[in-house]
Amino acid sequence: MVKDTATGECYRADKIVEEQLQKRIDATTDAVLKHELQTVFNQVDGLSQAETDKVITDYKITSEAGNPLSPCFPFNLMFQTTIGQPLHSWLMIRNVTQKIVQ
């Protein structure tokens, strides 16, 4: 997760990097640059937090508003909930599953 340093809006780091790299791939006519961008784009899902920060810095990735982004920070996309009686048992579910269950 990264945050727009001006507005405070949060983004999934991998998704905002992919979106901006794809725009640059589509816009460039330089074959060497296009290959470099495509290589980085293909690796985004497997990057560590530090590697993602480096890509954001190296390629000057900004928020949708054009503002600088904070360094990456961890964010758990799973949510804890209780199940059964008594309500001592708990499990972790994805937010998509949670919407279906409610």
Image (cartoon, rainbow, N blue to C red):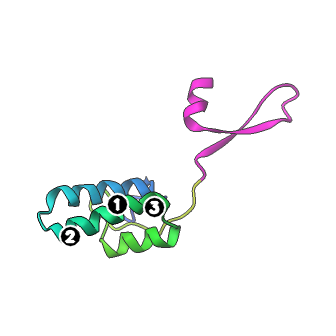
Q: Is residue 86 left or right of residue 77?
A: right
Q: Is residue 55 left or right of residue 93?
A: left
Q: Which residue in the structure is indicated by mark 2?
A: 33
Q: Nearer the viewer, residue 91 or 18?
A: 18
Real-space CA distance between mark 2 and mark 3, rounded to the nearest whole angstrom: 25 Å
Q: Which residues are magenta?
A: 76-102
**CB within 8 Å, label 2 to label 3:** no
Q: Is residue 9 visible?
A: no
Give me the residue at 57% from left, 37% from top. Answer: 95
**CB within 8 Å, label 1 to label 3:** no
User: Dividing the image into 4 quarters, which one contains the C terminus?
Assistant: top right
Real-space CA distance between mark 1 and mark 2, rounded to the nearest whole angstrom: 12 Å
Q: Is residue 80 left or right of residue 57?
A: right
Q: Amino acid at mark 1?
A: Phe
Q: Residues within 10 Å of mark 3 (few under 14, many from 20)?
A: many
| Secondary element type, mark 2 | helix
Say which quarter of the image contains residue 23. Answer: bottom left
